Amino acid sequence: MVSGIRTVMVTTPTMLRDLIERLAQGRVQLDIIAEFDARHDLARRLTSMRPDLVVIGLGRNETDGIIRGLLRMLPATKFIAFSGNGRGAFGFELQVYQTDLGDASPGVLIDFVRGSALGSGG
C-alpha cells in the first residue's frame, strides 16, 4: 500500500538513490513505485503512473529539455534533476498563479496578455 510520495527514479545511480532515501528518512515518506535505468518510452510510462515526484539523473552535457516536455504532460508532478556529477540539483514544477489586474482597464488587460504570451508570467 502506497502511503507517501509516489516517486519514480529515472537513470539515477544507486548511490544517489540511497542518499535521497537517507535524506528523506524521518522527514517525508518516499514510496519508490518504479525505477528506470533507461528513458525509452519514458513519457508514456510516467503518464500511465502519474507519480508525485520524479527523480532523474542528467548526463554531463544534458539540458533540462526532457523535463520541460514531461511537465507539459504531467503538470501535477514535481521533478528533481541531478547534474551528471550528482553535486547539483534542480527542482521543476508547474504552478498556477494569480495576478491582480486591479481595475481591469484595457491597458492592464493588454499588458497582462502580452506578458503571458511572452512567457514573463504577467
Image (cartoon, grey):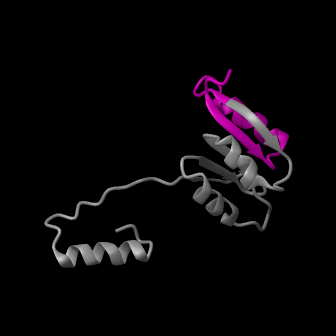
Q: Nearer the viewer, residue 84 or 38?
A: 38
| Residue at 72 percent of width and 55 percent of height | 43
Q: Residue 60 sits in which quadrant? A: bottom right
Residue 2, image x, y percentages:
66, 25
Q: Residue 112 sits in which quadrant? A: bottom left
Residue 28, image x, y percentages:
59, 28
| Residue at 21 percent of width and 74 percent of height | 108
Q: Indicate whether residue 71 is drawn in magenta.
A: no
Is residue 37 at all visible to an observer of this figure?
yes
Residue 103, image x, y percentages:
13, 66
| Residue at 19 percent of width and 77 percent of height | 106
Q: Nearer the viewer, residue 4 or 57?
A: 4
Q: Nearer the viewer, residue 50 or 59?
A: 50
Which of the image's four quarters has the C terminus? bottom left
Q: Which residues are magenta?
A: 1-30
Q: Indicate whether residue 22 is drawn in magenta.
A: yes
Residue found at the very far left of the displayed protein: 103
Which of the image's four quarters has the N terminus? top right
Residue 56, image x, y percentages:
73, 50
